[in-house]
Amino acid sequence: MIQVPCPWCGPRNSMEFRAVGESKSRPDVATTTPEQWRQYLYTKSNLADWVTETWYHRAGCRRYFAVERHTVTNDIRESRLPAAQLRQKEGSGS
Amino acid sequence: MSSAAATGRRLDPQAGEVIDRGSPLSFRWDGKAHTGFEGDTIVSALMASGVDVFSRSFKYKRPRGVLSATFHDPGCTVQVGDEPNVRAAHRRLAAGMDVSPENVWPSLKFDVRAANQLVGRFLSAGFYYKTFMKPQRLWPAYQKILGRFAAGGVTAADAEHGYYDKRYIHVDVCVAGGGPAGMAAAVAAARSGASVLLVDEEYHLGGHLRYGGEAELAALAELRAEVAAQKSIEVMTNAAVTGRYDMNWIAVVQRQPGISVRGRSIHERLCKVRAGALVVAAGLIERPYVFEGNDLPGVMLSTAVRRLVNLHAARPGDKAVVFTANADGDACAQDLRRIGVGVTVVDARTGGNIVSAKGGKRLKSVDLADGRSVDCDLLVTAVGWTAATPLLNMAGDRPVYDPTPARFFPTDRLPATVVVAGALAGDGSTAELIAHGTAVGATAAARAGHGSEVPVPALARVAHPELYRSTTHGFVDYSEDVSSKDMFAAKKEGYDSIELVKRYTTVTMGPSQGKLESVNAVAIMAEAHGVTDLNEIGTTVWRPPYVPITLGALGGRGFENTRFSPMQSWHEQHNAKPLVAGDWIRPEHYGDAAAEVAKVRDKVGIIDVTPLGKLDLRGPDVPKLLNLLYVNKWSKLAIGAVRYGVMCAEDGVVMDDGVTGRLAEDRYIMTTTSSGAATVWEWAESWLQTEHPDWQVHVTPVTTGYASMNVAGPKSRELIGRVVEGVDLSNDAFPYMHVRTATVAGVADCFMWRIGFTGELSYEIHVPAAYGLHVWEALFDAGSDLGVGAFGVEAQRIMRLEKGHFIVGQDTDGLTLGFGADLGWCIKLDKDDFAGKPELVLQSQRENYQRLVGLQPVDPTIVPAEASQIVEGAKKIVGRVTSSRMSPTLRRSICLGFVEPHLATPGTVVTCQLPDGRRVQLKVIEGLAHFDPAGARMKV
C-alpha cells in the first residue's frame, strides 16, 4: 500500500483516501458537445508517466487535493490544493 | 535401530541447548504417551524418544522424517488437537498436546497407498491432467479417490474459533532476520537513533550461531546483550516478514505472540508495518541433494542435525555418513563424533560423492560413488545454500546466479530503502558478518533519516562446489513428491520453461514454497537442457507470502461499525426483528408488518428513521449548491418550506433522493437515503472544494446527531399536538411539505417536517440524539388511547410501494437515468447547470430507454418475486419487476418495474416470467401510485 502525502495531514496510507482519478476540468455544460462530455466522463489518458490526480482524504481531514504521481514508480512529487482553490487564491491575492 | 528407540535418544546436556530439563512435558503422539522438555519442538521431543517417521508423503505416501528441522521441513506437518497443518519441527511442545499424523490410511506405520510407488508411472508429471480427465462422467468418482489422497489435516466443525488480531507498526528500520548480521544491523540502526523492529522466524535470535560451537555461542551472547541494551529495538521472534510492498509496507506474521484478549490467547497476529528502511538479513537456507532415496527417514541436512544435537540434545542416529562440501558439513561431522556417533565422511571437495540411499522406514545403507556401501542410519548432506531472496524479489530485484559460490546474489535494482545484510551479500567469519550488518544497519538508519551513511565493507564470495544432483534421480520437491525424473520427463514432453515446468509438475508449489526446492529445480532444468549457466534457465519469481498465513490472521479482527439508534433498547423490548441495513441494525417489523400498515392507514404509527442521512447546510450560497446537486430548482425555497429533490451523477444516473428544508435564512437540513449519506456528503464537498471554492457553504453531517422518527396516520396531528409546544399544527399554519423548529416532549431544538413517504398525514421529528428514546417513549405514552403502534422498515416499504415512491438502488440501478425513473416532472433542463445535465438533455431527446411504471398482476393473489423478468415472445427480455408486495390496504399484489417504452402506456398488459418458469400477466397502471394517487390523505 502506497503512502499519499495529504497537504493537511502529512503522509498517510492510501487506504485512508479515495482515489478520485485523473484531474480533469469539467466542460462548460452550456457549450459542451456529447463527445466532449463523454470524453470527460469516461476516457482517461492512462499514461505511464507523471499524472495529476485528485484524491480525497476520506478517513482524515475530508479535503480534496491534487497529487502528482508517477504511475510506474508510485513516486509522488507534489500534493497541493485543487486547481480551483489555487485559482481562487491567485484571484484574491492580486 | 529399535534399541535406540527403546533407550531413548536424549543426549547429555549440550552447551547451547534450549531445553529446560527441569520442566518435563507429557504429550501424546499417534495415540501413545511421550515426554519431552520445555523448549523442545514437537519433532525434537519425538526424535529424542526414538520416533523417526512423522508423515506420509503427498503422492506416494512414502514415510518421511526430519529433513531440515525448521518450520519449512516438508515431512514434519502434523495435526495438534483440532489444529491442522502444524509445523512440528518448529512448534514448541506444550503440556498435554495431542499430536497425530495427518491423513494416513489406515496408519502412519502402514499406509496402503504406499503401493502408489509401484505404479509411479501413472503418477508422474502431470498425472492429474493425464489420468483423471477421461471419461468425464467418472470425475465425481475420481474426486472421491483424490480426496482421500489430498494432503492436509482435519478441522473439527465444532472447534472454537481461534482469536486473531492485527497490529499497525510504524518504525524507522525493520530488520528481517535475527542472525548475526541482522542483530548487528538492528543495534547499529538503534545507535543511530532509529526505532527498530527486529523480526526472526525462530523462537530465539541468533540464526546459525545458536547451534554453533563455543566461539559462536560467545559471539551470540555478546550480540544478545547489545540488542537487549537498545531500548528502541523491538524484538519479535516466532514471526516472519512475509511480504514487502510499495514504500516498505511490510507484512509480518506473528505466531502465538503470547497475548490474551478477554481470556482468549491470540493464535496469530498480522502486523502491518510501515518502515523507513528494510534490512533484509534473511540468510541462507541449506539445500538438499538430489539422489535416489534422498527422502528416506534418516537422510538429513547438516543444519538439521546440528539443530537437533546442539539445541535440543536429541541424537539423530547412531551411525552416520556425512557428505560434505563445506565447513558447516565438517562442523556437523565433528558434532556427531562428539556425541559418540560413528561417522564416515565423504568429501565432495576431493571428489567424493554419494549415489543412493537404501532403506524402508529408516535409512539402512548408503552407496558411495567409489563403489563402497556403508551401513548407517543417518546420512547427512551439506551440499550448499539457497539464498533467501524472496523479500528482494518483492522489492523489485531479480537476483543473479554466481557459479563460484554456487548461489544467487542480489543486484543493484533494489530501492535505496531496501538494503541487504549478511550472508545474502556474501561469505564471512562471524566478525565479518557482524561488521557488515553494523554498516548496513547504520546505512538503513541514515536512509530512514537518522545519522549518516557509512561505507559497507564487501563480503567475499567463497568458492563452493556446484552440487545439485548425483548420478541417480531423487526428489526435488518433497512436499509435492516431484522427482528429477519427472522434471526430465516434463522437458521431454516440451515443457521447456521453468515457469511451465513448475505449473505442470507442481515443483516448488508445495507448502514450503520452493525454499528448499527452487534452486535444485532450476539446476535440474539446466541439466535437462544441457546448459551450465543457471541464469539461462532463470528462476520463478518469489511472491508473497514468504511463510503461510492462516486465513484467521488475514481476516483478523473486524473493525466495521455497527450502528444502532438511541431507541434500540425499546425495539429489543418490543421483539423487533433486526434488519441489517448497511452499518445499521433496524427493526424490520415487530411481528406483523401487514398489521403495522393497517395501524398507520387507520390510526397512527411511529417508525424509527434515525439512519436517514442528514446534512446541516449553512451559508448564503446554499441555494447555489442545492441547484447544482439536485435536478430540480431550489432558488426560491422559503424559510419553513421543504422540497423533495433527486440527485443525478454526472452521467445522468439517479444517485440519491430526499427532502431538504429551510429552517432559517442561512440554515438548511438535507436528508439523504440511509445508504447514501456518506456518498452525498463527499459529493457535496467535491463540488464545493474542487469546482466552487468561492461559495460560502458549510456542510456538516448530523445523521447520528439526531434521532429521527416518523409519526404517520390520520391521527398523527392529534398525537403530535399532545407533545409539541408552541407550534400551530393546523393545516393552514403548518401545511404539507413544511418544516418547523419545536420543543417536543420538553426537548428543545427539535425540528419536524410534514412529508409523505407513507402517503399519510405525517410528521417526521428530528430530536437531539441523546433525547431520542425519551421523545419516542413520550409519543407512545401520549398516544396510547389513539391506538398508536410502532412500525418497521417492511411496513414502510409496503406503504411507499402502495404510493409508488421508488427507492434508489432498489427500483433504480446504475443504468437508470433521470427520465427513466419517471422524474421528468422534476428535472429542470432550463437551469444553467446541475450535475448530470448534459446527459439528461441528451436523454430527453431520445425515446429508447426503459421506463419505471406501476404494475399490477392481473391475478391479484400472485406476488411476483422481485427481479422477475418481463418478457416478450419466447426469449426476449423487455423489463423487470423491481419491487413487489402484497398490499394489505388494497388486498392485492402491487409492483414497480421497468419496461421497454412501447409497453409503458397505461393499460398495457405485459408478461412476467416467474423464477419457477410460470408466466403471469401484469397490467401497467396510470402513474406509479397504486393508492391515493392524488395524495389527498397526506395533505389534510
Image (tube, coloured by chain):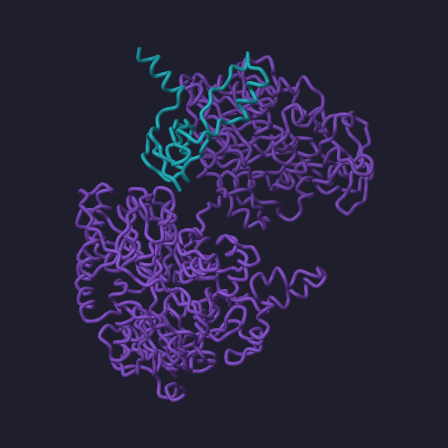
Q: Position of residue B697 (x, y in %)?
A: 42, 21
Q: Is residue B463 above or below residue B776?
A: below
Residue B852 visible at all = yes
Query: In the figure, what tint was chain A given?
Result: cyan
Q: Quadrant of residue B113?
A: bottom right
Q: Position of residue B906 (x, y in %)?
A: 79, 26
Horizontal side, residue B214 vs residue B633: left or right: left
Q: Is residue B278 above or below residue B160?
A: above
Q: Is residue B246 above or below residue B294?
A: above
**Near-viewer residue (B890 or B670):** B670
Horizontal side, residue B762 vs residue A74: left or right: right
Q: How many marks?
A: 0
Q: Quadrant of residue B434?
A: bottom left
Q: Residue furthest top?
A: A94
Q: Quadrant of residue B73?
A: bottom left
Q: Position of residue B627 (x, y in %)?
A: 53, 18
Query: In the figure, what tint was chain B given?
Result: purple
Question: Going 49% across and 17% down the picture, which residue do you hit?
Answer: B623
Residue B557 visible at all = no
Question: Going 30% across and 62% down the picture, which residue do you hit?
Answer: B464
Horizontal side, residue B82 vs residue B400: left or right: right
Q: Is residue A76 above or below residue B622?
A: below
Quadrant holding the C terminus of chain B: top right
Quadrant holding the N terminus of chain B: bottom left
**Near-viewer residue (B29 or B375):** B375
Q: Position of residue B93 (x, y in %)?
A: 37, 73
